[in-house]
Image (cartoon, helix red, strand yellow):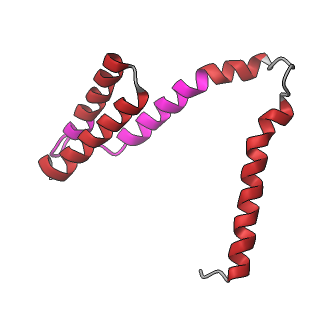
């Protein structure tokens, strides 16, 4: 699908408007000085863990434990992420380190 210049500009404008709206929506719904509802605070405390759990399941769903390399790169990388996070408590370090280790294994070791 090829867009004309006008269509591309309209598309970018609509995307910018929607992005601006989604960024402003929390400030419109919960203005400063007004208490945040309890269910929103609850979701803010439980959703990050739930999302991380879903991402882990999604990332590991395609592993074949009955064929080589038996999920070794994924399991070693997950262990590295857990170790790095327990050691340094730095999310970027643990995710980045696990990703680099996984890419190293899949590109050079378990080819």
Give the extent of the magenta segment: 46-74
Residue 3 place in picture, x, y as percent:
65, 80
Residue 58 place in picture, x, y as percent:
43, 41
Quadrant, the N terminus: bottom right
Q: How many marks?
A: 0
From the image, give the main secondary structure of the stretch colored magenta.
helix
Is residue 65 visible to us here? no
Residue situated furthest left in the rendering = 109
**Is 59 covered by the magenta stretch?**
yes
Give the residue displayed 74% in from the left and 23% down from the top.
40
Give the residue displayed 87% in from the left and 20% down from the top.
34
Direction from residue 41 to residue 82 in the image, left or right: left
Between residues 4 and 54, which one lies in front from this camera angle?
4
Between residues 35 and 65, which one lies in front from this camera angle?
35
Is residue 40 visible to us here? yes
Direction from residue 29 to residue 2 in the image, left or right: left
Residue 80 place in picture, x, y as percent:
26, 28
Give the residue displayed 31% in from the left and 17% down from the top.
87
Give the residue displayed 22% in from the left and 32% down from the top.
76
Direction from residue 97 to residue 9 in the image, left or right: right
From the viewer's perspective, is residue 80 above or below residue 74?
above
**Is 13 covered by the magenta stretch?**
no
Q: Image quadrant of residue 100?
A: top left
Direction from residue 88 to residue 10 in the image, left or right: right
Residue 103 place in picture, x, y as percent:
25, 47
Q: Image quadrant of residue 13?
A: bottom right
Q: Image quadrant of residue 69?
A: top left
Between residues 72 and 83, which one lies in front from this camera angle?
83
């Amino acid at each position: 699908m090829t867009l004309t210049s006008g269509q591309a500009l309209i598309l970018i404008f609509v995307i910018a408007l929607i992005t601006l709206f989604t960024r402003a929506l929390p400030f419109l719904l919960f203005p400063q000085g007004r208490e945040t509802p309890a269910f929103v605070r609850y979701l803010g405390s439980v959703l990050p863990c739930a999302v991380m759990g879903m991402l882990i399941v999604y990332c590991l769903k395609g592993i074949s434990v009955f064929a080589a390399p038996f999920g070794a790169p994924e399991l070693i990388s997950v262990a590295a992420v857990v170790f790095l996070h327990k050691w340094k408590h730095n999310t970027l370090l643990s995710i980045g380190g696990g990703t680099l280790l996984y890419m190293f294994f899949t590109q050079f070791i378990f080819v």
